[in-house]
Image (tube, rainbow, N blue to C red):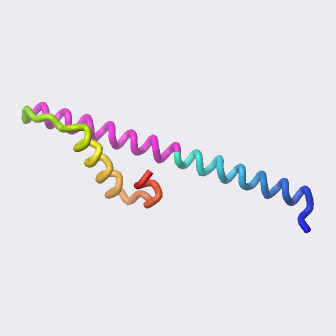
Amino acid sequence: MLSTTSCRANVNFREKMATAMDEEERKLQRLKAAVHYTVGRLCQSIGEDHQKEFSRQVIAAIAETTFRQCGMPKEAQYQ
């Protein structure tokens, strides 16, 4: 049978793990946003040079492909 102290320690461990995972998720989301922003700016610059306009869908597809090609973990790619 587990003691109260042991159960409390287990709960604290799970809470710390969840907090660490939440922080990792926030970091990945910020990284994805930064990649998307950078791709958007590059597309805007190239589009101005060639009198073309990139749709939001194209920018999102390029950003997602770029993110995947950087070797990010699979769980980060599909969120």
User: What kind of secondary structure does the magenta stretch mostly adopt?
Assistant: helix
| Left or right: 6, with 75 as reference point | right
**What is the x, y in percent for residue 24?**
54, 49
Considering only vertical position in the picture, is 60 above or below 49? below
- Please state the extent of the stretch shown in magenta in the rendering: 26-49
Residue appearing at x 20%, y 38% in the figure:
55
Residue appearing at x 15%, y 37% in the figure:
46
| Left or right: 61, with 20 as reference point | left
| Left or right: 77, with 3 as reference point | left
Residue appearing at x 7%, y 32% in the figure:
51
Considering only vertical position in the picture, is 54 above or below 65? above
The image shows a total of numbered marks equal to 0
Decide which of 79, 40 is in the foreground and name it. Answer: 79
**Magenta residue check for 12:** no
**What is the x, y in percent for residue 37?**
33, 37
Considering only vertical position in the picture, is 62 above or below 40? below
The residue positioned farthest toward the bottom in the image shown: 1
**Magenta residue check for 27:** yes
**What is the x, y in percent for residue 43?**
20, 38
**What is the x, y in percent for residue 1?**
91, 68
| Left or right: 74, with 62 as reference point | right
